[in-house]
Amino acid sequence: MKIVLSFFILLISVSAFAQHSQEVKNDSLIPWSQNYQLKWSDFKGKIPSEEIKGTSAAVTCSGWQSSLQYSDGVLEGEYVNVFDRLQSWTIDTTSSQLLNHEQLHFDISEVFCRKVRKGIIELIEKEAITAESLQALIDSLSNEKDYNQGLFDKETAHGTYGLKQLEWRKKTDEELKILSPFADSFIKEQD
């Protein structure tokens, strides 16, 4: 019997598909990589026609994409944090502080993506992995991620408080390091 645990989770509305690779897929998606830092040229999305007061850039499509399947006692697939160039936009291509702020949003998303991967492994080890337990894990961490993204924007005034942003950078780098055992987007575990 084949049970398919396949789902697509969004951080912010996006349709994104990524392959098991750290390369850009079809020139629009960038899977998160420690070796790649966003550039202003990555922000290729259309600037909203309505005025966005006080906003100079937006990572509106950093998302989690999954292709997990469970079949014959084997859970296998990917859980990837991606940046979509065609949905992210900017009106300011000169501020390195703002670009660092947008990169940090992407990095925070990776922290929570790794927490999902860690949670999946823990569910497997407890033999408690079901579609429901998986969805509950993802929903919980997605909510926690959204809260932290909002708190990051609030505490840094969308990147204008440099010292506060440095605190967030340090905290995020520490979390990425702690969660480094879950950096690989590919998951393959057997019962």
Image (spheres, helix red, strand yellow):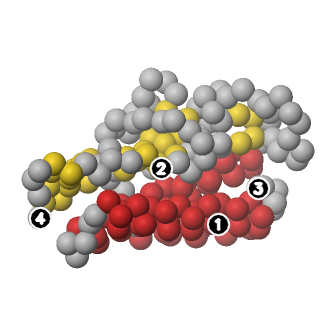
Give whichever of discs 1 and 2 has the lower sequence position: 2
Amino acid on which the number 4 mark rests in the picture: Asp
Q: Which residue is mark 4?
A: 191
Q: Which residue is mark 1?
A: 147
Give whichever of discs 1 and 3 has the lower sequence position: 1
C-alpha separation, residue under disc 1 versus residue under disc 3? 17 Å
Amino acid on which the number 1 mark rests in the picture: Tyr
- The residue drawn where x is 42% and y is 28% is 25
On screen, residue 186 above or below 178: above
Q: Secondary structure at mark 4?
A: loop
- The residue drawn where x is 69% and y is 52% is 101
Number of the label disc, if any, that sits on residue 9 = 2
C-alpha separation, residue under disc 2 versus residue under disc 4? 25 Å
Give whichever of discs 3 and 2 has the lower sequence position: 2
Q: Nearer the viewer, mark 3 or mark 2?
A: 2
Q: Nearer the viewer, mark 1 or mark 3?
A: 1
Q: Which residue is mark 3?
A: 159
Between 10 and 149, the one nearer to me in the picture: 10
Give whichever of discs 2 and 4 has the lower sequence position: 2
Amino acid on which the number 3 mark rests in the picture: Gly
Mark 3 crowd level (few <14, some 14–19, many ≥20, 10 Å Cα): many
Asked whether the residues under the numbered discs 3 and 2 touch, taking CB atoms below 8 Å apart as contact, a structural biologist would say: no
Q: Secondary structure at mark 2?
A: strand
